[in-house]
Image (cartoon, rainbow, N blue to C red):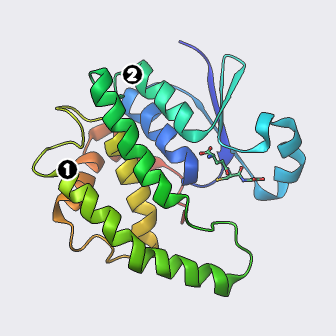
Amino acid sequence: MPHYKLTYFNLRGRAEIIRYLFAFSGIKYEDHRIEQADWPKIKPTIPFGKIPILQVDGVTLHQSLAIARYLAKETGLAGQTPLEQALVDAIVDTTDDFMSMFPWGEKNQDVKQQIFNDLLTNTAPGLLRDLESFLGDQKWLVGKTVTWADFYWDVCSTTLLFLKPDLTDNYPKLLALKERVQALPAITAWIQQRPKTML
Ligand code: GSH
């Protein structure tokens, strides 16, 4: 088994999908959380200057979704066939397109609040409607078994629900999916033990 070292801030953020994959598959890794104050010093030492990164026996991987996809393939959570894998990727990318619209680093709090409100009130319902309809009466988003697309829904919706607690009230199937993911024993255990952070 390779030695895995994950580096990110002390946030769920873009690292949490990776942590879910480690938690679910029971693979040991170093969950290295850096202080925001130390980031300017660390940034120049990191290829491409962004985190999360995952070091795999010294090879540095960047881009959270590339890292997650690699772990999902290693652990059988990427989808059972190439077609399922493409569907999983498409759902993850669709969800990520929305998460990437938020100006997370905006310094002007009024501007930030206004854009967040607009996205949560006016843009989110379209995505949620589409995801709810894609899920339909299936247990998991793609195929007959859980995949990292289900994990990504739980990770992203946890943050969205922190920002707008009634966001998913009209989407019972998506809420039930979230509960199913969080009821997986390894995920339940991880959620209980992880550092408590807002984002
Ligand atoms: N698409 C990249 C991914 O998913 O990994 C985005 C990486 C990214 O923007 N990371 C942020 C970062 O490194 C934290 S969420 N911010 C510090 C900086 O840009 O200096």
First in residue order: circle 2 vs circle 1 = 2
- At a point 49% along the width and 55% down the height, the residue shown is 97
The quadrant in which residue 21 appears is top left
Question: How many numbered tags mark residues here?
Answer: 2
Measured from the top left, where is residue 115 in percent x and y? 56, 79
Q: In the figure, 91 relative to 80: above or below? A: below
Secondary structure beneath dot 1 equals helix
Residue sitting at x 21%, y 42%: 140
Q: Would residue 174 be visible to someone looking at this image?
A: yes
Tell me how far mark 2 sits from mark 1, CA to CA. Answer: 23 Å
Question: Residue 135: which disc?
Answer: 1
Task: Determine whether 56 is above or below 189 in the image.
Answer: above
Label 2: how many residues lie within 10 Å, few (<14), some (14-19) or many (20+)? some
Q: Which residue shows up at 65% across the image and 83% down it? A: 111
Residue shown at 55% from the left, 32% from the top: 67
Q: Secondary structure at mark 2?
A: helix
Which disc is residue 75 wearing? 2
Picture quadrant where residue 132 is located: bottom left
Q: Amino acid at mark 1?
A: Leu
